[in-house]
Image (spheres, rainbow, N blue to C red):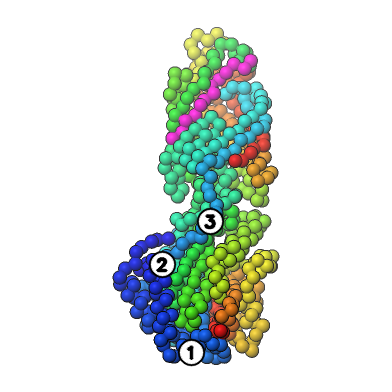
Amino acid sequence: MVYFKKPFLELAAIVPLLFSVVTPVGAQESDTAVEGANAPVLRLLSYNINGLPSTLTKGKLPLFERIAEILRERRASGTQPQVVVLQEAFDKRTALIAETTGYQYVYKGPGRRDTSRKGKAHWVQGTRKGYAQRPDPQKIAGSGLYILSDYPIFDARYKAFDSDACAGFDCLSNKAIQFARIQTPFSETPIDIVNSHFNSRSSAKAPGKIVLKAHRKQTDLLAKYLDQFSKGYPVIIAGDFNTKQDKRYQYFRQNINLIDAGEACLSERQTCDIREGTREEELLYRTNDKQFFANSQSMRLEPIWAGRNFDEELNGKPLSDHLGYEIHYRILLSD
Amino acid sequence: MTRKLATGAGLLTVLVGVLSLPAIANDVDASFGGRPIYIEADEFDDERKADSWAGQIGFGLSMAPRFVGADEHVASLGFDLKVSYKDTIFLENNRIGAVLYRNRFVRAGAIARWNLGRIDTGSLSLLETIPEVDDAFELGGFAAASFYKLFLTTEVYFGVGDELKGTSVEVEAGYTFEPNSQWRITPILGAIWSSGRYLDTFYGVQEGNPDFAAYRPSGGLAETYVEIATERRLGKNWLFKGSFRFSELLNGAADSPIVQSDAGSRDQLQAFVGIVWLF
């Protein structure tokens, strides 16, 4: 693995911008409106790969290998998602998806040892002997998050959920929000990518009120740090937000003022295609996997394709208990 | 995040990679097959600061046997104090200690206990020939393991004064249930093993006692207990706290003439209800 410190990454991000200035092809479009079929497209896949720690599950390696193989096949055909956000990549072997699929930039989410703090309430604060209490939340797994990108990531931040922003078994992993700023070759304007995996419901095995409260707290944190990270660039947030429950989705939408990519696609069927076999409800509200986006003054994102993919089976087993959630965004630039 | 310095080869890789990108293109170099560049990330600054000091002070009513092994139980004003400094030094009522080792699941360290002994509160006058036991100091160690809401703690004490000799080991395990965000209930199971010398201090009878036959307890499992502890949050810094413990004395403790007498009992109760202020 090669790790780069930020100054190098910033340099790496600047180089293509300089290069674009002296490249005649397309350079004239960088500051003018780009419309129609010629506009560049950013394909973004969000995929919960169900890679629980290997001690809990067995027989997963062939599934991870097949997921990586599909991404390689798509790269070979030139249709790969340029950005992939993964959730539940807890199993170390899931790294092969990050490392063998041709993505040059990998941002792995916080691990087990990375910071998460004791919030105002601690899930295990009830232990009555002080020395048995822990100053920081006990984590046995990392965040399980990855952002894979074909384009340079020149700013990367994260916020791990504190102990009062998780509930039940979810607290055992160091769940977090990843923020990445990528420099595409389409424009000088970068695009912000956000990935997260919010608190589950029934599998958290905690009382409903506590789980809902934690989920809302996570939504509040996403809103807070999204605002802090934002510099007015377009943003796409993608992940497993566990918003299938109506009141979770409503709270999320009220507090995260972004466009639901599924809604946007389905409301513009003349310009947005749906993958064959994908049901509308799988893009809208009967899903925990979602993508949302916001435009900027100089860049507009327009969904032109949406689909739930990675639906094949391997030896009778689905590749994951989730489907991929992929959106293709046409990138429209203006002065 | 793992932090590693960039390597020259890595820098070359990224420069070659990005220079080969078309200025406006949907796709990138599909032939890239090298190892990816892992991006270093920073955590957002967080305004939360861990306080060095934390603790709680509680007042309420407590109930306990008049002396260890007594049948009679008395209620009195109860006091509950817990203070910790940097999650390392702690004071909990009559115990003080320091965490010296910690890892993902286990914490261990040194602990000391001020044993209140057995004082003459009137009831002992019924047992005029059983002497008081003065306060005593015990030193030892502890280990605690926790996983999720399950915890297991062990404390080992050695009497270091003339009043109290011997060894006592206390083990307890519990699991915290949270019916809602304001309420916690923790059932606890515990056991105490004590050496013969330790038991002799509280349950032994000297030769020549006019009321009881001489008795030298042997060491072994001396007590088991079940306890229910509960906390109900009343406000940001206030808790209602309650606990109820039922213990049964066993073996060398239960066979003591003191426990077997009319003034003694194998069954022991302890309880506390009170209001606690968190700081």
Residue depicted at x 43% and y 84%: A20
Magenta-span inclusion, residue B12: no
Of all chains, the one bearing label 3 is: B
Q: Give the residue type that dot 1 points to.
A: Gln
Q: Give the residue type that dot 2 points to.
A: Lys
Q: What stretch is highlighted in magenta?
A: B110-122
Of all chains, the one bearing label 1 is: A
**Relative to the observer, which residue lies in front, A254 or B228?**
A254
Q: Which one is earlier in the sequence, the residue at label 1 or at label 2?
A: 2
Please tell me if label 3 and label 1 are on a single chain: no
Contact, mark 3 vs mark 1 (Cβ under 8 Å)? no
Q: Residues within 10 Å of mark 2 (few under 14, many from 20)?
A: some
**Relative to the observer, which residue lies in front, B68 or A184?**
A184
In the displayed structure, A138 sits above or below B203; it is: below
User: Label 2: which residue?
Assistant: A6
**Relative to the observer, which residue lies in front, A163 or B162?**
A163
Splitting the image into 4 quarters, where does residue A297 fall? bottom right
Q: Residues within 10 Å of mark 3 (few under 14, many from 20)?
A: few
Splitting the image into 4 quarters, where does residue B234 fall? top right
Residue A159: image x %, image y %?
52, 61
Circle 1 or circle 2, nearest the eye: 1
Q: What element carries label 1?
A: helix
Residue A316: image x %, image y %?
50, 75
Residue pushed farthest left? Answer: B8
Q: Is residue A309 left or right of residue A148?
A: right
Q: What element carries label 3?
A: loop
User: Label 1: which residue?
Assistant: A28
Residue depicted at x 64% and y 38%: B276
Q: In which quarter of the image is the N terminus of chain B?
A: bottom left
Judge whether residue A66 can be spotted in this image. no
